[in-house]
Amino acid sequence: MEQRVIDTVRRVFELNGFIGIETRAVEEGASLLKKGETSKEIYLLSRLQEVGHESDTPLEDRLGLHFDLTVPLSRYVVEHSGDIAFPFKRWQIQKVWRGERPQEGRFREFVQADIDVVGNGVLPEHYEVELPLVMVRALEALRPFGLPKATVHANNRKLSEGFYRGLGLDDIEGVLREIDKLDKIGPDAVAQLLMDTCGADERQSRACLALADLSAANGEELQVKFDALCERYEIAHDGEAYMLARQGLDTLTMIIDEAARIRPGSVIADLKIARGLDYYTGSVYETFLEGVQSLGSICSGGRYDNLATQGGKRYPGVGLSIGLSRLVSYMLHTAGAEASRVSPAAVMVAVWDEADRAQSNTIANVLRERGISADVSPNAAKLGKQIHYASRLGIPYVWFPAQAVDDAGESGGDEVKNIVTGDQRAADCKSWEPDTVYARQTIGLKAE
Amino acid sequence: MEQRVIDTVRRVFELNGFIGIETRAVEEGASLLKKGETSKEIYLLSRLQEVGHESDTPLEDRLGLHFDLTVPLSRYVVEHSGDIAFPFKRWQIQKVWRGERPQEGRFREFVQADIDVVGNGVLPEHYEVELPLVMVRALEALRPFGLPKATVHANNRKLSEGFYRGLGLDDIEGVLREIDKLDKIGPDAVAQLLMDTCGADERQSRACLALADLSAANGEELQVKFDALCERYEIAHDGEAYMLARQGLDTLTMIIDEAARIRPGSVIADLKIARGLDYYTGSVYETFLEGVQSLGSICSGGRYDNLATQGGKRYPGVGLSIGLSRLVSYMLHTAGAEASRVSPAAVMVAVWDEADRAQSNTIANVLRERGISADVSPNAAKLGKQIHYASRLGIPYVWFPAQAVDDAGESGGDEVKNIVTGDQRAADCKSWEPDTVYARQTIGLKAE
């Protein structure tokens, strides 16, 4: 069902020079458990022969299914660091598994499409605008399947952290965690949580909300508004906290100005984007579809300065990930894409009589050699039945092989009928081409 | 690593009108355990939260990873029988998992490429020659990657069973199991096993080996030789056993004669092909690579009259499966295909100075819009370093954006250099095309 969507996204990744990798689904417990995520929705494996003795093996030594594509990338980079030309731009589209109780609308198994660029020691900042733009292009390429316009909302961890520290707050992770709830529970409840759980007073809490509320059309406006906010909350320009915030602000300014130059409206600054995960160290991104609140972010990511470490080496990265299954599910159920699976064949060759099947096969093979996907009728049923079979498979053309001698004793040539329009005409399998509009493989998803 | 191989095989399947499906990796224990296979190399899953309590859940209610693509197909057909237009021709290329102790050269996780056609109640015999021929075409399409010529060896369960019963043997499964060992342990050891474990006397045992030894260049020769064998071992033409054998013989005759007409030498009769699995009911196939004994069969399958049942309904099928991971592993390690991963980009645009990156990005984007995969240098390092990076990624062209003003004060146009041949010339990103030989994405596998 997702094949054409996967193909489309992958095509954009490859046009942009990303290298495809595929990693095994099975990772060691030690890799899966070391990541900062506390939810630990992991499926562990046990061989049938081990049933009843699973617990004899420590968790770290057991095997489990990967729950994202970042853990495998981290392992891959360390294992292949000698062979990789850094910076390493990779795409990866694979299933991931979450060991959660299955609920309505939540999958135990789903497909993610990730791009990351990983540096050896250093990683230039320009990737922090290039990667979200590649995702914007990938999502644009899905619009013919019924996807609304997508906009990347960007923020920066350093900006937030610097500002919070400038206010005198220390529990940065806590503040980010509460700010992340803004869309769900609203500003009043978040303000209360900041005071109850993060040690903020009312003024600090108000300041955090004011920062989250800050939006700007361009880099200059962003900088002016941010500085005004710092002045209002007495965060001095020469303090360490402001310096840190300034680093983040400059990166975010670069991102939105550069993105506006290349694709206006595709990436905006949104200072309430927090991201739950603690391994992001700079830019963070979430992506929303126009008019679709319910889905939440469909493509998220950020910069992490320690994707992997090996001895004294550090591999910083920037990456984003599309939850493809959820997107396809939305397209099918809400955006009105068609779910019925159809044949990739552009034409089905009819069979007049089982004794003539070889003739039909020969025609089909000539078409295939020419790159035209062709099927042959399963049986020599009445023509109406054969056409009905093609129609159920969504095959637009039916080919009628020449009958050596027709009822009137005349020999006729091959003909092909477009069963959508009813148009029927003489055709030669060595030269015939389907009309492009009918040749296109729709494969279950609405095309335009 | 396998992506181009997967793409190639899939292309052949789709040209032949097979419909792609994808099923979840996770099936219920009840489905996984009901299949006749006794080895049961299954990975069961448990959620991290369940560790220590796994055994509270009966095996049938637990989840496990599929170990082939036939069990999921069977479930899929039953679940979607109302929507499917039968006969249902489907391709499926996915990972499967075997819960076996990992050993040298054996994977816990590998990719299979399957085609099957499934009928509702009935399934015409012509598919029994068409499906192996599609696999022959798929394997032919892999020859540019270094794969030797493949030949499908076909046999028929009814033929074997009828002959064994005609000899007075009853333990048909037992005889097939021992005959299956011929290539491994040789005829003497098999003869001994037939006598020790299948209740055969010396004459019956010799007859079984004589049948396994029977080969023929065409259907007529096959029939003559088989009848001669029946005469020698006094199997009467009017007995039930012979009738059964005759059914299989006729199907096998049709297969090799029809295949010889379309692709001479692609499918041969080989009466020692037994296949270990007990669910085959007619044709069985194994496929061998010319000059490669060690790999064994690389593509196997057969006809099963009960792929799935639902109430009173029966869904017979014919299918073959390529073990793609093993094949790719062979191509890389033995057939001399190159393993180094390279970029899909045909060209890398150089960057003279970080301030000029926007110019390089614009050129790359124009190329991408035209369908040419393009990368941009990660940094404005010395030109030699940039070219070295492109070279490590296997990118054949480096693009030099016009320098507004060169050292002599002259303004110049864009140029592009083929870093393989050294050829450098003026180029316009709106019209330039890479030479096809360099534009082709080799992606790790030797192309011719």
Image: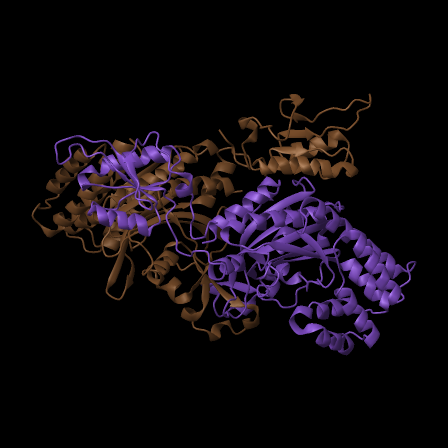
Chain colours: A brown, B purple
Q: Is residue B312 above or below residue B425?
A: below
Q: Quadrant of the N terminus of chain B?
A: bottom left
Question: In the depicted view, which residue is nearer to us: A376 or B350?
Answer: B350
Q: Is residue A87 left or right of residue A138?
A: left
- The total of numbered circles placed on residues is 0
Instruction: Decide if residue A287 is in sight here.
Output: no
Residue B414 percent across, percent down from the top left = 25, 33
Residue A43 percent across, percent down from the top left = 47, 61
Residue at 70% across / 48% down in the picture? B259
Q: Is residue A382 above or below residue B183?
A: above
Residue A29 percent across, percent down from the top left = 41, 66
Question: In the depicted view, which residue is nearer to us: A185 or B144?
Answer: B144
Instruction: Decide if residue B68 is in sight here.
Output: yes
Question: In the depicted view, which residue is nearer to us: A135 or B182?
Answer: B182
Residue at 42% across / 45% down in the picture? B441
Question: In the depicted view, which residue is nearer to us: A293 or B77?
Answer: B77
Q: Is residue B318 left or right of residue A234?
A: right
Q: Is residue A305 above or below residue A250?
A: below
Residue A378 percent across, percent down from the top left = 72, 39
| Image quadrant where residue A339 sits | top right
